[in-house]
Image (tube, rainbow, N blue to C red):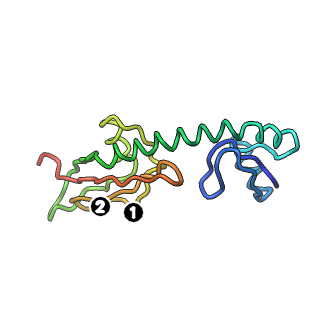
Amino acid sequence: MLVILKENVENLGRIGDVVKVADGYARNFLIPKKMVAPANENNIAAVEHQKKLLEKKRSAEKLSAEELAKKIAGFTCNISRKTGEKDKLFGSVTTGDIADALKAGGIEIEKRNIHMKDAIKALGVHTVEIKLLPEVTANLKVWVVKEGA
């Protein structure tokens, strides 16, 4: 099924792109979440008209994302956790914890944009990738320290 993307969908495309997806994926996931519109003649004509506006919007988004990436690169995220014997963490540090720490520092990032292979389960410095746009990523240094230290 041919559809027009109304918002950026990872591994599929960006706003305004006309893509072919499986019928079930479109009917059961994308259309109910209002992420796409069916690609008929009227919708394609409307998208072609708005392509110029989308390009301006994309360039503005990219500039703001690059500025935010610089801000994130200069930000130090400190997260304190309780530890047990041999400095082993109780629990782990997740993307939600990092998003909360960034929010406390004045940087609004959704936790789905924070990419970690696994949750952080040890004290020390860890580098976490934050994907702001498909072409703009930032690396954040996360310091996990003992609570009360």
Residue type highlighted by circle 2: Lys
Q: Residue at x 31, y 42 (%)?
A: 101
Q: State the quadrant of the N terminus.
A: bottom right
Q: Which mark is residue 87?
A: none
Secondary structure under the numbered disc 1 in the rendered image = loop
Q: Which mark is residue 121?
A: 2
Q: Residues within 10 Å of mark 1 (few under 14, many from 20)?
A: few
| Label 1 sits on residue | 118
What percent of the width, then of the height, locates residue 59? 55, 42
What percent of the width, then of the height, locates residue 135? 51, 54
In the image, taking residue 140 as reference, residue 135 lies left or right, namely right
- Does the rendering let one see residue 65? yes
Q: Is residue 43 or residue 48 the one in the foreground? A: 48
In the image, taking residue 74 as reference, residue 96 lies left or right, namely right
In the image, taking residue 141 as reference, residue 83 lies left or right, namely left
Q: Residue at x 46, y 43 (%)?
A: 65
Q: Is residue 106 or residue 23 the one in the foreground? A: 106
What percent of the width, then of the height, locates residue 125? 24, 58
Residue type highlighted by circle 1: Asp
Please say if the residues under marks 2 and 1 sit with CB atoms less than 8 Å apart: yes
Quadrant of residue 148 in the image? top left
Q: Residues within 10 Å of mark 2 (few under 14, many from 20)?
A: some
Q: Residue at x 47, y 52 (%)?
A: 136
- Residue positioned most to the left: 149
